[in-house]
Image (cartoon, grey):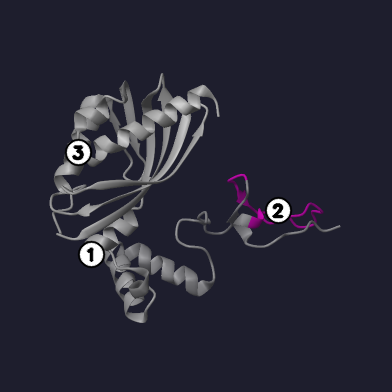
Amino acid sequence: MSPTEQRNLDTMAAVVPFWNRHDVAGILSHYDDEITWHDMALGRTHRGKAEVGAVLRMLFDAVPDLHLDLTTRVPHGDSVAEEYTLTGTHLGTLFGVPATGRRLRIQAVSFVRMRNGRLAEDNFYVDVAGLLVQMGLFPPLSVTETGWGRAGLQLAVFLRSPRRALATRRARRRGGPGPGSLPARAAGGSRSATGGTARPPAAGSRDPAPIRSQADAGLTVRRPR
């Protein structure tokens, strides 16, 4: 292990007690001034200590007894990969979800880029599906894989987009792909692979008709010898 990797590990280890004390200032003291958080699950980016600090305060307010347990930590050059678990009781608004009073166990992974021994960028992935199940907002697989569960999800998909759901069902009955995956064909002729209209050869012509692509025709067309 290089001296840089050891310094990075020491910094990451030093941050954990501040997390478990909910000490936002202490956490931020280990961050670079231009710290960037990429919340990959929610598609959000938080830049600078002010924005990251606001997210931390929201998290600690929503889960007042939040505790961080480290599972794995692996250094590699200027980067550190971590797997960790956050546990606590959901007593405030978390990611827009009102308090449920439920006990949460949030599993997450972070890929952190370090700069001069401080956290400069964190790409973190949270098990959102598992979190929603624990909040009671999403059915567990033990339910969705039952007949009633599948029926309920099919109804939810239909209500979300009735036209697409019906088009997908018709396509499945025909044995073809879903809606929007096939190019439209003009009346009186099929579409060629280059976008033009394929026309039959003139009478007496020895030139075969243009070959359509397999993706368009759904089969392989061979040229006549």
Q: Nearer the viewer, mark 1 or mark 2?
A: 1
What segment is highlighted magenta in the picture? Answer: 194-214
Image position, residue 194 (x, y; %): 62, 44
Which amino acid, mark 2? Ile
Q: Which labelled disc corresponds to residue 211?
A: 2
Q: Is residue 191 left or right of residue 78?
A: right
First of labels 2, 3 by sequence position: 3
> Circle 1 — which element?
loop
Q: Residue furthest right?
A: 225
Q: Nearer the viewer, mark 3 or mark 1?
A: 3
Find out whether the residues at labels 2 and 3 contact each other: C-beta distance under 8 Å: no
Specify few, some or many for label 1: CA neighbours under 10 Å numbering under 14, 14-19, or 20 or more: few
Image position, residue 103 (x, y; %): 21, 59
- Residue at x-position 22% and y-position 60%: 135
The mark total stands at 3
Residue placed most toward the observer, 36 or 210: 36
First of labels 1, 2 by sequence position: 1
Image position, residue 40 (x, y; %): 37, 42
Q: Which labelled disc corresponds to residue 22?
A: 3
Residue placed most toward the observer, 196 or 21: 21
- Residue at x-position 76% and y-position 57%: 203
Queried whether the magenta region covers residue 123, the answer comes back as no
SS majority, magenta: loop
- Residue at x-position 28% and y-position 64%: 138
Specify few, some or many for label 2: CA neighbours under 10 Å numbering under 14, 14-19, or 20 or more: some
Q: Is residue 146 left or right of residue 58?
A: right
Q: Which labelled disc corresponds to residue 136?
A: 1
Q: Nearer the viewer, mark 2 or mark 3?
A: 3
